[in-house]
Amino acid sequence: PRSVDAKRLVCCIVGGLAEQKQERQLALAPSIVVATPGRARELIEDGKASTVAKALEERTLRFLILDEADRLLAPGAFADFTLLTKRYLVDHAERPRKRWQTLVFSATLACGSTQPRDKKRKRQTDADPRALLKAVEPLRSPTRKLEVVDLTSSSKKEEEDDDEEENVALPSTLTLEAVRVVDAAKLATCYALLRGGSSKGKTVVFTNAISSVKTVASALQKLQIPRVHPLHAALQQRQRLKALDAFEKNDDAVLVATDVAARGLDVAGVS
């Protein structure tokens, strides 16, 4: 309802922003807390998130939601989340689990796959659903039955890459094309596609390293490609938000990013 204060309903807790403001927001006892593991652990252990700590300790949670769960639960990936899990969420004799519901989301699980992939061909983004379900089990309320809901498209398109074939599920609005070039021609090809592309709209250029983002973004700016914005993990949170805001506001903007932009962004008009 419009009469409900959004700050009292939802609170966003992330690193790179002022702890004092987030502490004040948590003091309002919001119904929903959206948090990254690192900052959540900092605030809880420093006593600045008493409402969250109380909900965890007294087991009054109604829902525990893990987004991008394949990354959160990967061994050694998020030590802060692992520590929070062992302290608050795993069942103990003196603090048994109550009736909450755990919801797990991931866009990189092949739920229909029964045969494991060849390790040599396995892509970095592939996730093993069996390993993920095993990792989720300790977080599940004992009164809830485990269910897997596959929301991927049932229609799959087969594409052949050399001698290897893969089934790729693509949205109907997405066209997949590839241009094979040598390393020395990558930047020139990128420039040509940006300058001569038939479609108009926002563009995202992904690279595999922070140094590559800096190199590509600087080169495109010198080549007078308008509104080029770099985005990578070495930037402060305020700088990332500023780059995303500028990218979203301009119809012809270019975002040069690492995989920090691969998940969780919802920007209209990307062509």
Image (cartoon, helix red, strand yellow):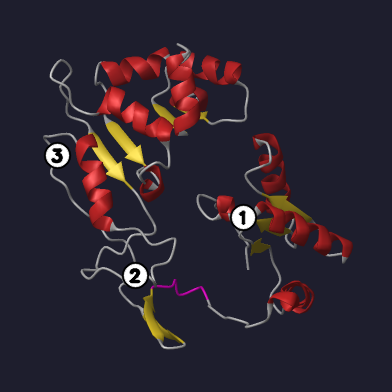
Residue at 67 percent of width and 50 percent of height: 231
Q: Position of residue 24 (x, y in %)?
A: 54, 15
State the image quarter where residue 234 is shown.
Answer: top right
69 over 152 or under it: above or below: above
Front disc: 1 or 3: 1
Marks 1 and 3 sit apart, C-alpha to C-alpha, by 38 Å
Secondary structure beneath label 3: loop
Disc 2 packing (10 Å; few <14; some 14–19; many ≥20): few
**Amino acid under label 3?**
Arg
144 over 111 or under it: above or below: above
The magenta span reads 169-174
Q: Where does the N terminus fall, quadrant-wise?
A: top left
Residue at 68 percent of width and 41 percent of height: 235
Q: Position of residue 220 (x, y in %)?
A: 81, 64
Report the residue marked by disc 2: 153
| Residue 258 numbered mark, or none | 1
Left or right: where 62 falls relative to 24: left
Left or right: where 39 falls relative to 213: left
Disc 1 packing (10 Å; few <14; some 14–19; many ≥20): many
| Residue 144 numbered mark, or none | 3
Precedes in sequence: disc 1 or disc 3:
3
